[in-house]
Amino acid sequence: MAKRRREDGSGSAVAASSSAASPINNLDDGCLMQIFSFLSPIPDRYNTALVCHRWHYLACHPRLWLRVERPMKNIEPGVFPNVEAAISAARPGDTILIAAGGNHVASNIQIQKPLCIMGGGELPDDTILTCSRGSDSALEFLSTCKVANLTIRAELGCCLLHRSGKLTIEGCILQCEENPLDYLSFPIVSTASGCGAFTPSVKGHGDCVTVARTRIEGGAKAVRTSGNLVLQHVRAIYSRTSIFFWFEVGEQQVSAKA
């Protein structure tokens, strides 16, 4: 077997061909797709899609994702015209990739199974979900779910309504109307009861909301909670144009009396 000849100097020829010569690229499409299926949707599979055209095709294949795109003449398997249709067709554990561009409507969509919902653009501004007036929320969660890389706008009401389960919000923008009814406008509302300090319930056990790298705009407050859940571990990072938040909504710790 002939050895690869190294160029004198910077070795740029070897560097340029290293990607093409990588052993993983010798696998067929089916094997690669099987490997990608074990990656977490965010950030691993999302970053995988940015490597090259082939990996983008395989990482975004309908077998791995459900996609929401603008209506087309010939609808492909796994592609849906709106968010509600994709959520209805999804199986527990599926990832729904919402195409960038345009304005997607999401009003009072109830999610009762574990799902990951993410925007397909490079930035959260590229994919917008709008909740129209007269709706309680854009998305209502009754199961463990993740929302990422999305802008969600609520004209009156809340962006995300958390009923139960573990909700993770990562790299999003949540926008609510500031006036005239601030008391009705919240980016996040959690009505989960949490598990009691002395009598934990199986149904409520583990209810929480985790927020990371998310910009929140409008509303009297960022979060409204009920039951035993309270705002915790708040951290903010200021940039020139925005403030990004990290925080948790979790069970309030109550000290037992002696």
Image: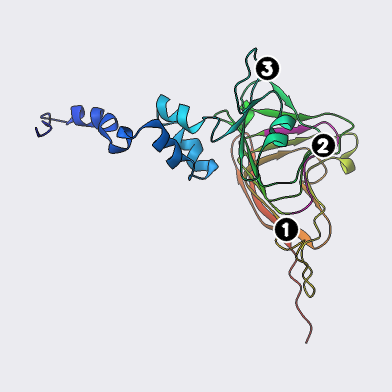
**Residue furthest toward the bottom?**
258
Residues drawn in magenta:
151-164
Determine crowd level at label 1: few under 14, some 14-19, many 20+ residues with C-alpha closer than 10 A: many
Q: Are marks 3 and 1 in contact (CB under 8 Å)?
A: no
**In which quarter of the view is residue 139 placed?**
top right
Give the SS element for disc 3.
loop
Q: Nearer the viewer, residue 152 or 176?
A: 152
Label annotation for residue 207: 1
N-terminal label among 3 and 1: 3
Disc 1 is placed on an element classified as: loop
Q: Kindly identify the residue that appears in the image at 87 percent across and 30 percent down.
A: 133
Q: What crowding class fits label 2: few (fewer than 14 Cα within 10 Å), some (14-19), or many (20 or more)?
A: some
Q: Amino acid at mark 3?
A: Pro
Residue at x 61%, y 45% (from the top left corner): 93
Q: Give coordinates of residue 89: x percent, y percent.
A: 69, 34
On-image quarter of the N terminus? top left
**Left or right: 154, with 3 as reference point:** right
What residue does disc 3 label? 71
- Pointer 2: what residue? 108
Q: CA distance from mark 3 to mark 1?
A: 36 Å
Q: Quadrant of residue 32?
A: top left
Give the Cα distance between marks 1 and 2. Answer: 20 Å
Identity of the amino acid at label 1? Asp
- The majority secondary structure of the magenta stretch comes to strand
Q: Earlier in the sequence, mark 1 or mark 2?
A: 2
